[in-house]
Image (cartoon, rainbow, N blue to C red):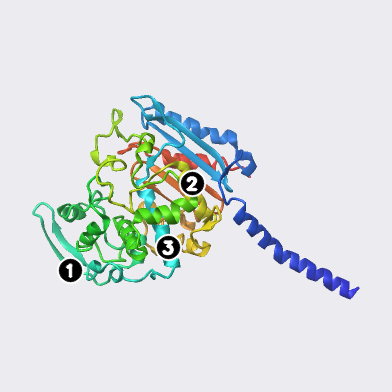
Amino acid sequence: MKKVHAALILLIFIAGCMAPNQENTFRKTRENILTQATPEQVGMSGERLQRIDNLVNEYIDNNWIPGGVALIARQGKIVYYKSFGFNEIESKDSMQTDDIFRIASMTKAITSVAVMMLYEEGKFLLDDPVFMYIPEFESPTVITEIDLDKETYSTKQAKNDITIRHLLTHTSGIGYGFINPEMRFFYEKEDIPDGFVVSDARLGDKIKLLAKQPLLHEPGEKWTYGLNTDVLGYLIEVLSGMSLEEFFHTRIFIPLGMTDSYFYLPDEKVDRLVTIYAEEEDGIHVSEELSYNYPFEGGKSYFSGGAGINTTALDYARFMQMLVNGGEYKNHRLLSRKTIDLMTTNQIGKMRIWGGTPFGLGFSLVSEDQKHLMLSSVGNYSWGGYFSTSYWLDPEEELIATFMTQIYPAIHGDIHQKFQVLTYQAIID
């Protein structure tokens, strides 16, 4: 009896050890490829998700946005995927779910993943100085005084070199011309673009010029949103021996099945590109900004790692699902889950970005001290794009979501926050 009792205890112990592993294996594989399901199959309410329809249609009816596409998936199941309004209001061209959007800074997540793929191959360490790979970044300077009216300034030698981690966390001191007047003063003189390029400029040439411009502050001193991810795009070219376009296409887009994702659209897909609108006090109007035609006009030679990709909601969802899956999609592994853990860990200490959140290696993060601000989960990570696109991923809830429209400026940009609220309130399990 003692032997039987001991054997029973051993079996219970082994079963207890195996069960979590079996569950973990199930959780890692069940959502490997996005498929459609009813919301109720994954613990969400279809009736509650209908509130999103009301929200988006209200914004369209009030002439605040032209239209949009929304996609939500949980546990690898697409539970909400709809288009609203118009691709182009004037022609009454209805928005389709497979229409193509300029995602601007949502490109940064793709570039950050590409960088970390090379990190996993041993190409660099995160705290390596950038000048080891792009020599022009050696000996950076920092602005000490500047008078934009008189066009005078003074600089000093930086105490620290810019590292790859600084670029991934936007703590290098490199800014954006459209955000920082001080940077615009320097960047315009060298024709350094913010990312929307219709000339025949090339990324490497402009990044080498950028490297010689002074910084807003000491590397690592504070968080400043800027052209850091464009520098990372060129770093990928240097380390891989490919253009950024080729790297994205062969190493990310093809493996994930992202067949509608491009820097520059092929001619046969240009008619699916959503028209850009500008919101003003009297409503929305077609934007007259010529640089916004970059997906199909100009030299088509500048691969902006910070802002250049055009894609669909479903293609971007495939990319997000890869991250929620722990780095794998369609049996193609891009990253280790440990690397994703690193990317979604606060990298900037007590510094905070817009909205008071911490920042990882390419993403805004929801931390324990931020969870009271909005319906979300600790560990949620996200970002958005200049033309009013947004996404977030919630590993705890196995949830991904994106809402895409095309409007800048957007007075009623709060639709993205409301979309997030209406997604979370539909969770009922």
Query: Is residue 158 shown left or right of residue 373?
Result: left
60 is higher (above) or lower (below) than 200? above
Q: Nearer the viewer, mark 3 or mark 1?
A: 3
Q: Secondary structure at mark 3?
A: helix
Residue 177 location, x and y as percent?
23, 51
Residue shown at the point (28%, 51%) measured from the top left? 302
Q: To which quarter of the image does residue 158 belong?
A: bottom left
C-alpha separation, residue under disc 3 versus residue under disc 1: 32 Å
Asked if one can make out residue 359 in the rendered structure from this viewpoint, the answer is no
Question: Where is residue 314 shown, x and y percent of the image?
Answer: 48, 42
Where does label 1 land, which residue? 156
Residue 97 percent coordinates (x, y): 46, 35
Residue labelled with disc 3: 116
Picture quadrant where residue 14 is located: bottom right
Classify mark 3: residues with Cα within 10 Å, few (<14), some (14-19) or many (20+): many
Q: Nearer the viewer, mark 2 or mark 1?
A: 2
Q: Is residue 303 visible?
A: yes
Q: Quadrant of the N terminus?
A: bottom right
Task: Decide which of tag 3 and tag 1 comes sooner along the chain.
Answer: 3
Q: Amino acid at mark 2?
A: Ala
Query: From this viewpoint, which residue is outermost toward the right?
Result: 1
Amino acid type indicated by mark 1: Lys
Front residue of 242 and 54: 242
The amino acid type found where label 3 is placed reads Met
Residue at x-position 35% and y-position 61%: 236
- Mark toward the start of the polypeptide (2 vs 3): 3
Q: Which residue is mark 2?
A: 317
Specify which label sits upstream in the sequence, 2 or 1. Answer: 1
Where residue 80 appears, as percent x and y from the top left, is 54, 38
**Please, what secondary structure does the residue beneath circle 1 have?**
strand
Q: Residues within 10 Å of mark 1 (few under 14, many from 20)?
A: few
- For label 2, count other residues whose C-alpha is less than 10 Å away and answer few (under 14), some (14-19) or many (20+): many
